[in-house]
Image (tube, rainbow, N blue to C red):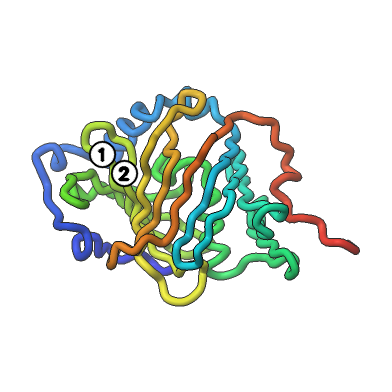
Amino acid sequence: MKYLILISCLFLLGCGSTTESEEMTAEILVDRYTEAIGGRMAIESVSSLEFRGLYVEPAYNIVIPAGILQKRPYYRVVGDLGTVGFMEGYNGTAWEYHEGKGLTLSKGEAREAILVGSQFDHPFLDADKKGNKLVYRGLSEIHGQQLHELEVEMDVAGQAYTTLFYLHPHTYLPVAQLKSMPIHAVGEEVPILVYFSEYRPVNGYLIPFTETERDSRSGKLLNAVFWDEIIPNQEIPLEKFDPPVEQGT
């Protein structure tokens, strides 16, 4: 993925700043976010998560069961062969498994997308430990709402990758994220706004139960996921994050 040029003011509904934004820093904003979602102890109390719900993608008339397993620090698997015929994951290596096609080790944009998605927490949390760089960029307006804009630069597979988070000025919860990537890792990069909503406590840690992705240029809905339940701290063996074993191997 290429470096995401900071074009947010071009397609968001204007940008602005206030006295509060001038006094804000990236460090203060992250501290307030940490307290807002439950505090450091609540964050550290969650070692694994299982997500169960529904995934919708209008362009392909897709409505399918959705599932994710995550375990600190970076283990992740998405999908299920029995229900959707597809899985992808990260166990130290990024992989994909398609029913009928077998195992593929992810490369290029697909690998980078999996690496970005495998982070257990938002990349601005403990940014220094992760080697990520933060820049507070003031207040930006999205659909008439002033939100704190936080730039996060990461090194993903040796490539600089930048994403923007937009946090509520009073609750300090993330409302949206701007990222740039090809749809399904194919074709040109698309600036995508991810919206987070319906926060609920999971073991004292606030997590959004609804996420929607839209093309930020047109507003077109790309996909949405609705979690029915998020289960914390299950005993998940590391083998769960490995790809399925192909017959004959």
Quadrant of image for the C terminus: bottom right
Q: Are marks 1 and 2 in contact (CB under 8 Å)?
A: yes
- Residue where numbered disc 1 is placed: 168
Q: Earlier in the sequence, mark 1 or mark 2?
A: 1
Q: Is residue 145 left or right of residue 62?
A: left
Q: At label 1, which amino acid type do we have? A: His
Residue under the point 57% across and 54% down: 64
Residue under the point 75% across and 45% down: 239
Whether residue 47 is visible:
yes
Percent of width and height locating residue 169: 21, 37
Q: Is residue 67 above or below residue 95?
A: above
* 52 and 35: which is toward the camera: 52
Quadrant of image for the N terminus: bottom left
Q: Is residue 11 left or right of residue 35?
A: left
* 217 and 65: which is toward the camera: 65
- Say which element carries label 1: loop
- Say which element carries label 2: strand
Percent of width and height locating residue 162: 37, 58
Residue 10, label in figure: none
The extreme bottom residue here reads: 187
Residue under the point 63% across and 66% down: 106
Question: Label 1 crowding class (10 Å Cα cut-off): few <14, some 14-19, many 20+?
Answer: some
Q: CA distance from mark 1 to mark 2?
A: 6 Å
Q: Is residue 1 left or right of residue 191?
A: right
Whether residue 128 is visible:
no
- Residue where numbered disc 2 is placed: 175
* 4 and 49: which is toward the camera: 49
Q: At label 2, which amino acid type do we have? A: Val
Percent of width and height locating residue 26: 28, 41
* 92 and 198: which is toward the camera: 198
